[in-house]
Image (cartoon, rainbow, N blue to C red):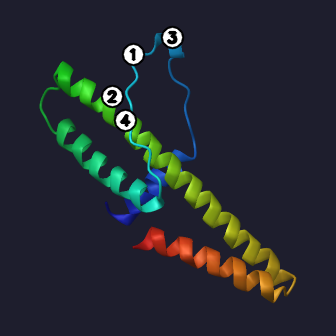
């Protein structure tokens, strides 16, 4: 998935819109829960491509709609993991920012290393 689309998806994941009440929603499906950022990025890419293929069809069948509903759970989990990882990365950068203002070299180095490690995962 191109990085601009990934950035858009990540920013969209920061906001949630309420939908139907739980009792009004259809059956829930088990979803894959990514254990790492790399897994989340992989699931996000694979399931987004599968969704795109289905949406290219002229008409969606009931089975297609069920598949889309099922895939949405894994996509939501992937976005949640990405959101959490991005928040942790932002926290590390903020720590670097504040420590640099205080000329706190130890924190700049430790939090800078944490930030760079996380940032590399997003840019690979």
Q: Quadrant of the N terminus?
A: bottom left
Direction right: furthest residue: 102
Q: Earlier in the sequence, mark 4 or mark 1?
A: 1
Q: Earlier in the sequence, mark 3 or mark 4?
A: 3
Q: Residue at x 70, y 77 (%)?
A: 111
Q: Residue at x 81, y 79 (%)?
A: 99
Q: Residues within 10 Å of mark 4 (few under 14, many from 20)?
A: some
- Left or right position of 81 against 106: left
User: Disc 4, disc 2: CB below 8 Å?
Assistant: yes
- Left or right position of 10 against 45: right
Q: Residues within 10 Å of mark 2 (few under 14, many from 20)?
A: some
Q: Residues within 10 Å of mark 1 (few under 14, many from 20)?
A: few
Q: Residue at x 47, y 70 (%)?
A: 121
Distance from label 4 to label 2 (Cα)? 5 Å
- Left or right position of 60 against 88: left
Residue topped by disc 2: 69
Distance from label 3 to label 2 (Cα)? 16 Å
Q: Residue at x 55, y 32 (%)?
A: 17
User: Disc 2, disc 1: CB below 8 Å?
Assistant: yes
Please name whichever residue, 73 or 90, is drawn nearer the observer in this view of the structure.
73
The label on residue 72 is 4
Residue topped by disc 1: 26
């Amino acid at each position: 998935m191109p990085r601009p689309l990934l950035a858009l998806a990540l920013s969209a994941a920061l906001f949630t819109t309420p939908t139907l009440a739980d009792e009004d929603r259809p059956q829930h499906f088990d979803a894959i829960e990514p254990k790492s950022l790399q897994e989340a990025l992989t699931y996000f890419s694979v399931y987004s491509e599968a969704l795109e293929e289905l949406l290219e069809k002229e008409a969606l069948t009931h089975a297609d709609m069920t598949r889309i509903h099922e895939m949405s759970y894994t996509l939501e989990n992937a976005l949640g993991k990405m959101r959490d990882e991005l928040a942790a990365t932002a926290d590390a950068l903020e720590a670097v920012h504040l420590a640099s203002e205080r000329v706190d070299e130890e924190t700049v180095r430790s939090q800078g290393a944490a930030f760079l490690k996380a940032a590399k995962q997003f840019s690979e």
